Image: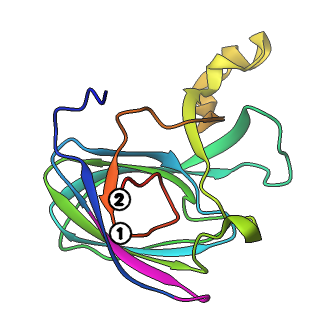
Amino acid sequence: MVSRWAPPISYMHIYECQEFSMGIFCLPTSAVIPLHNHPGMTVFSKLLYGSMHVKAYDWVDPSVATQPRLAKLVVDRTMSAPCEPAVLYPTSGGNMHAFTAVTSCAVLDILAPPYSAQDGRHCTYYRDFPYSSFASTVDRRRDGQHLDLAWLEECQPSDDFVVEGVPYSGPQVIP
């Protein structure tokens, strides 16, 4: 049983081909799309209406695949429409990101190329921890210098994360 009292997030699929996919996420107030990635993809996001908080990270060293992994905070702000579109690249611009709806809002997303599990482009979810959580004692004394660093650990999204929509191969969807 889902404990969520708020309306679920909706996804309206617009178009998909081998080169890109396009759709709109509609988030009710306080809805959260948890921290996730878009591996090997460039993402164009445009806030169409409303306000949302965005928190986004890039890997400090993309070649390191240990768990947890060190990431650098690149965005931690609230955006309100109208605003400029955001571009997330495969290794920069905040490819691991979370959205929290401050007000009801809608986001147009264009992913190039689209998610494809068979091609290794599947969504991974993360939880973030302060840098000091896994830093050594020596590093903890210098923690003020690491305010923009965090540790990301892979996880499953919570059971109350629901996205309703038509076929979509990204974050968990309930048709």
Q: Is residue 109 visible?
A: yes
Residue 42 is tagged as none
For residue 166, the mark is 1
Classify residue 174 as left or right of residue 69.
left
> Badge 1 local density, few (<14 within 10 Å), some, or many (20+)?
some
**Which region is colored magenta?**
17-25
Q: Position of residue 104 (x, y in %)?
A: 14, 55
C-alpha distance separating marks 1 and 2: 6 Å
Quadrant holding the C terminus: bottom left
N-terminal of the pair, mark 1 or mark 2, is 1
Checking the image for residue 175, the label placed there is 2
**Residue 161 pos. (x, y %):** 37, 40
118 above or below 31?
below
Name which residue type carries label 2: Pro
Q: Tell me which residue sits at (35%, 69%) in the image.
A: 166
Label 2's element? loop
Q: Amino acid at mark 1?
A: Val
Residue 33, horizontal then vertical, whole percent = 38, 48
Query: Which quadrant is the N terminus positioned in?
Result: top left
**Relative vertical location of residue 109 with respect to residue 150 in this rendering, above or below:** below
- Whether 60 is drawn above or below 146: the answer is below
Q: Residue at x 21, y 41 (%)?
A: 30
Residue 24: image location, x then y, percent: 30, 72
Residues 99 and 25: in front is: 25
